[in-house]
Amino acid sequence: MTTLGPKVGEQVREVSLTKDTISVDLFDGRTITVPLAWYPRLLHATPKQRANWSIAGAGYVIHWPDIDEDLSTQGLLQGAPAPRGAAKAA
């Protein structure tokens, strides 16, 4: 199986979080919304920690320095929740 890398336009434009979801707007016009339950570090973070994010990885990664969490647009587009055991690391 071949894994394709990120494509132009799949870079992060904006991130918004609710108490239950994370939504990521991409430059190509798509919005990805997934449950925070997929990402235990974000789920258990404070609102202040969730709000402190930056774009990294040439625009394809969202980084939360306060909780050491990184999400890629590729993983979000593939519907990939955090690996099991990630909650223990948080």
Image (spheres, grey):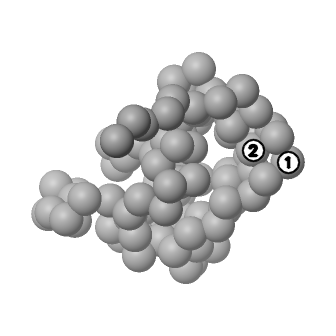
Residue 21 is situated, as x and y percent measured from the top left of the image, at: 58, 73
* Label ID, residue 26: 2
Q: Residues under labels 1 and 2: Cα distance? A: 6 Å
Q: Quadrant of residue 13?
A: top right
As helix, strand or loop, the secondary structure at mark 2 comes to strand
Q: Residue at x 41, y 75 (%)?
A: 37
Q: Are marks 1 and 2 in contact (CB under 8 Å)?
A: yes
74, 41: nearer the viewer: 74
x then y, percent, for residue 45: 40, 63
**Residue 10 appears in view:** yes
Q: Nearer the viewer, residue 1 or 6?
A: 1
**Above or below: residue 5 compared with residue 23:** above
At horizontal 51% and vertical 24% (from top left) the residue drawn is 57
Tell me the element at label 1.
Answer: loop
Q: Residue furthest front?
A: 1
* Residue furthest to the right: 29
- Picture residue at 69% right of the left edge, 37% below the top: 10
For the N terminus, the quadrant is top left
Q: Quadrant of the C terminus?
A: bottom left
Tell me: 78 left or right of 38.
right
Q: Amino acid at mark 2?
A: Leu
Task: Characterize the local packing of mark 1: few (<14), some (14-19) or many (20 or more) Cα atoms within 10 angstroms.
Answer: few
Three-letter code, disc 1:
Gly
Q: Position of residue 61 (x, y in %)?
A: 52, 35
Farthest-out residue, top: 58
> Compared with residue 18, is residue 2 higher up or lower down, i.e. above or below?
above
Label 2: how many residues lie within 10 Å, few (<14), some (14-19) or many (20+)? some
Which residue carries the number 1 mark?
29
Count up the numbered dots.
2
The residue that appears at 82% across and 41% down in the rendered structure is 28
Asked whether the viewer can see residue 64, the reply is no
